[in-house]
Image (cartoon, helix red, strand yellow):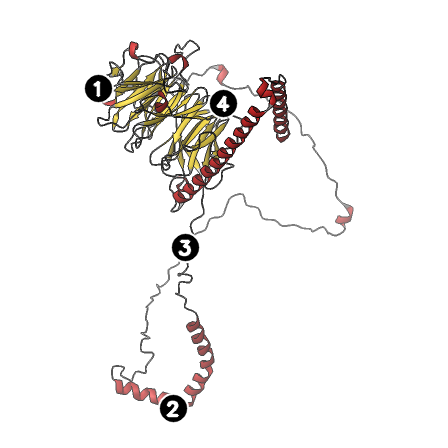
């Protein structure tokens, strides 16, 4: 016989119960109502049966099973007497004539005919199987603009700010991301690895990119989806190949690199498909060949020249903040600068004036985004300070469309590759806004709050339905757009072209009028006696300062009143 002992600590027994004897305690007493007592009489004696166990009984009975038989009649020929052969036409005809001569048959038909006539006429008037309004054109479905979060990709190496996002070409669902986490002295405060993510696996990245220094930008080659080019904080450019692992396969030597960090790299349209160019804070653009990275193939200094004999100098160059390149215009590109200008450049120009022919005063600070419309290449958007502008290459002084200024700075914007009138922009307040210029030019058609983590980069997949939004803390939100925000309608391109041409024509008229006013003012100043004597008004600058100060305070009062 086996014995098991169960051991338990005293503290697991619980609280010790304490029992004691105690008499009954009266909680409440309800006295009888004398008025109600008079309505009843006392019954005596009283017999009441009480049983404390339930009753169980069993009943058995045997009955005969009922037999059922199903019969029917075929009413295709009606009910005929037994002596009439329904297969003999003459016999059935004789019986019909016999019945029709009876008076009872005539009275029955006269009684039933009004009701049958009513239902027959009603049936002929309304066709219950008719499809009404088939000749009318179908109305388009009601637009339902929506945006939902599909996945969130978090930085596994800590909350590093995102500096660039690039989708893999050829419709693949992968994207490369570069992260930048450095201090004031440009020393890394965390990992410097870039990551390659698969849109369907947000748990972990597919692979790491290990650059020799902090990676600021990472872009795929449109003609070779396995090659990537990156720009480093040291001014060098590097190449990665997904098939050959995480390490950089090639890098330019430091003595031929940029003098300062590289902010943007872009592949260009070339026969080999291996050429790209880079732009940095030093104000230089350099073209590279992936087959020979020992030195750049060409260099251009972004220094605005006033005369044809001016020599470009790195000391006067504008620092490049962003670049834009269109494959259908192989010799031209655009750069956004740190001082708020957008410069239209021509690589094949012979003089500095031909290389940098046009500049646009876009913003008061750094140009954060610059992108051409994929359907209308003459028009491009710029993002800087608190504004988003839409420009035309034909208007150099002012944008053709300007979005209302916001209280928080706009960090990034991009065009939709499948819908010509749609653009997305992100703000420092954590909101992503969708603008449809055909629907409204004063407010976005849809906004979505992503959280307290401000978004800094946004890129749309080439199919137009997925949007990757990178934030300041290293998270990437994958958003999915509705069908109405993805596909273009039939006349949408023509309507958008009409809007852009109308606004461009209006800006041209305004620019011509402003030039006339300036010319008249200049002529009036030259013809004045004070100008002929060479005497300047010393109080002119004070008056301008006072007017500017008053205008500023008026704007501040209006803003405070609107809050």
Quadrant of the rendered structure where residue 192 is? top left
User: Does 86 appear above or below 470?
Assistant: below
- Mark 4 or mark 1, earlier in chain: 1
Residue at image mark 4: 364
Q: Name the mark nearer the viewer: 1 or 3.
A: 1
As rendered, which of 313 and 61 lies closer to the eye?
313
Residue at image mark 3: 138
- As measured in the structure, the alpha-carbon distance from the residue carrying label 1 to the one carrying label 3 is 58 Å
Local SS, label 1: loop
- Mark 1 or mark 2, earlier in chain: 2
Q: Name the mark nearer the viewer: 2 or 4.
A: 4
- Mark 2 or mark 4, earlier in chain: 2
Residue at image mark 1: 291
Q: In the image, residue 22 lies at what x, y percent?
A: 65, 25
Is there a contact, CB below 8 Å, between mark 1 and mark 2? no
Residue at image mark 2: 101
**Quadrant of the image for the N terminus?**
top left
């Amino acid at each position: 016989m086996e014995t098991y002992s169960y051991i338990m600590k005293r503290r697991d027994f619980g609280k010790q119960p304490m029992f004691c004897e105690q008499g009954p305690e009266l909680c409440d007493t309800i006295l009888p109502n004398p008025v109600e007592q008079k309505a009843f009489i006392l019954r005596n004696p009283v017999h009441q049966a009480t049983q404390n166990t339930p009753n169980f009984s069993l009943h058995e009975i045997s009955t005969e099973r009922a037999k059922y038989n199903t019969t029917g009649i075929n009413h295709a020929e009606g009910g005929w007497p037994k002596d009439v052969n329904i297969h003999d036409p003459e016999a059935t005809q004789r019986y019909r004539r016999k019945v029709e001569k009876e008076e009872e048959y005539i009275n029955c038909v006269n009684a039933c005919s009004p009701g049958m006539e009513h239902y027959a006429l009603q049936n002929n008037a309304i066709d219950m199987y008719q499809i009404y309004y088939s000749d009318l054109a179908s109305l388009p479905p009601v637009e339902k603009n929506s945006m939902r979060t599909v996945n969130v990709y978090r930085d596994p190496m800590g909350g590093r700010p995102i500096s660039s996002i690039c989708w893999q070409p050829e419709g693949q669902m992968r994207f490369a991301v570069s992260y930048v986490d450095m201090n004031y002295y440009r020393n890394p405060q965390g990992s410097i690895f870039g990551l390659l993510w698969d849109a369907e696996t947000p748990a972990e990245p597919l692979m790491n990119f290990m650059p020799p220094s902090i990676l600021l930008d990472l872009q795929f080659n449109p003609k070779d989806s396995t090659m990537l080019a990156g720009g480093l904080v040291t001014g060098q450019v590097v190449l990665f190949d997904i098939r050959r692992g995480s390490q950089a396969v090639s890098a330019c030597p430091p003595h031929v690199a940029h003098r300062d960090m590289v902010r943007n790299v872009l592949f260009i349209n070339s026969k080999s498909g291996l050429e790209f160019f880079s732009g940095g804070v030093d104000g230089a653009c350099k073209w590279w060949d992936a087959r020979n990275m020992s030195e750049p193939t060409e260099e251009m200094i972004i220094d605005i020249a006033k005369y044809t004999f001016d020599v470009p100098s790195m000391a006067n160059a504008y620092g490049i903040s962003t670049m834009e390149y269109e494959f259908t215009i192989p010799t031209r590109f655009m750069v956004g600068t740190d001082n708020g200008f957008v410069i239209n450049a021509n690589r094949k120009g012979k003089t500095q004036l031909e290389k940098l022919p046009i500049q646009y005063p876009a913003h008061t600070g750094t140009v954060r985004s610059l992108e051409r419309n994929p359907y209308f290449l003459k028009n491009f958007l710029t993002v800087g300070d608190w504004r988003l502008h839409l420009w035309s290459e034909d208007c150099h002084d002012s944008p053709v469309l300007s979005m209302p200024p916001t209280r928080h700075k706009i960090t990034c914007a991009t065009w939709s590759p499948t819908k010509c009138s749609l653009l997305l922009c992100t703000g420092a307040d954590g909101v992503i806004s969708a603008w449809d210029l055909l629907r409204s030019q004063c407010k976005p058609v849809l906004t979505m709050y992503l959280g307290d983590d401000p978004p800094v980069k946004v890129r749309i997949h080439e199919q137009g339905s997925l949007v990757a939004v990178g934030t300041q803390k290293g998270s990437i939100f994958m958003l999915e757009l509705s069908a109405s925000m993805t596909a273009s309608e039939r006349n949408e391109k023509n309507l958008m072209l009409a809007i852009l041409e109308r606004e461009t024509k209006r800006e041209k008229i305004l620019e011509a009028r402003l030039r006339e006013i300036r010319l008249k003012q200049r002529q009036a100043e030259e013809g004045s006696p004070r100008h002929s004597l060479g005497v300047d008004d010393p109080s002119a600058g004070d008056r301008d300062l006072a007017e500017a100060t008053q205008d500023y305070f008026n704007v501040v009062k209006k803003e405070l009143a609107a809050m």
